[in-house]
Amino acid sequence: MRRREFIALVGSSAVARPLRARAQPASRVYRLGFLSAGFSDNPVVRSIQSIAAELARFGFSEGKNLLIEARYAEGRAERLPELAKEIAATHADVILAVSTPAAHAAKDAAPSTPVVMAFAGEDPVAAGLVASLARPGGNVTGIALLAAEMDAKRVELLAQAVPNGRRLVLFSTRYAEQDRISLAQRTANSLSVELVIVRAGNKQDYNEAFAVIARAAPEQPTTFEIAINLKTAKTLGITLPLTLQAQADEVIE
């Protein structure tokens, strides 16, 4: 299989888009770089396993004609440039970068290597990863989550779900772009709701952040799907307005 076809397979696997399998010769060993700002023991590990399983359907068997070079920053994004250089030194055919900071690090460390971004929260154009969506240029492609818009929408929906609430908590990584946080903050302000921003960057931060959330005692990509579980709401003592239920794509009785 040509190198660009292998890259296309990695991109398709990263977004869970299956392709028809066909056998490939094992004469060439392909290298897949995997760079994440997260922890090696978190669910993202399953992403590697699922991608490896998908590639196996096309004749790429890990340990035979496929090598996966995985690096995790363990919640310390400042390590990403160093880890990206390690992957670049292996001459990976393609790098799968999980998060916007990881995509930046991979792009800088291996400017001639295709980079497939996954779970990238920020707008790739605003983040400087691509020139434009129509004509990205450079070596980066993949999926962006439009996290800023989604965070703002979550604030709006929570405010509707708990109309008497006056304080909400936004739990975020400490590496999230300020523009992303600001949009959620402006949304909360427009709804006269206090938004408490809690940032975390490592396991200790996460534990402390949850403690902060407990002390705070809150009173509670283009298409958004809303599911409302009325049974859970009833258990929590919350009566959801009919106007909110009408917006839901799915209402679980």
Image (cartoon, rainbow, N blue to C red):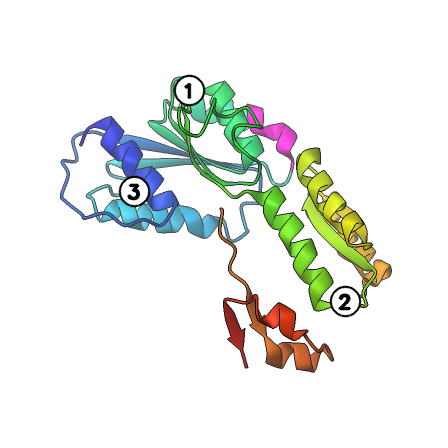
Q: Tell me which segment is drawn in magenta.
A: 76-81
Task: Give SS at disc 3.
Answer: loop
Q: What's the residue at 57%, 70% (across, down)?
A: 246
- Residue type, mark 1 in image: Gly
* Horizontal side, residue 59 vs residue 166: left or right: left
**For this rendering, which residue is in front, 29 or 158?**
158
Q: Secondary structure at mark 1?
A: loop
Q: x%, y% of residue 240? A: 68, 74
* Residue 201 in view in this figure: no
What is the distance, in whole Å, between disc 3 and disc 1 at their CAs? 29 Å
Residue at 20% in and 44% down: 58
The answer to the question of whether label 2 and label 1 lie on touching residues, with beta carbons closer than 8 A, is: no
Q: Report which residue position mark 3 lands on.
A: 62
State the residue at coordinates (13%, 43%).
Answer: 23
Secondary structure found at label 2 = loop
Horizontal relation, residue 60 to residue 52: left or right: left
Give the quarter of the image for residue 113.
Answer: top left
Q: Is residue 54 left or right of residue 141?
A: left
Residue tagged by mark 2?
Answer: 163
Judging by the rendered image, the residue that carries numbered circle 1 is 138
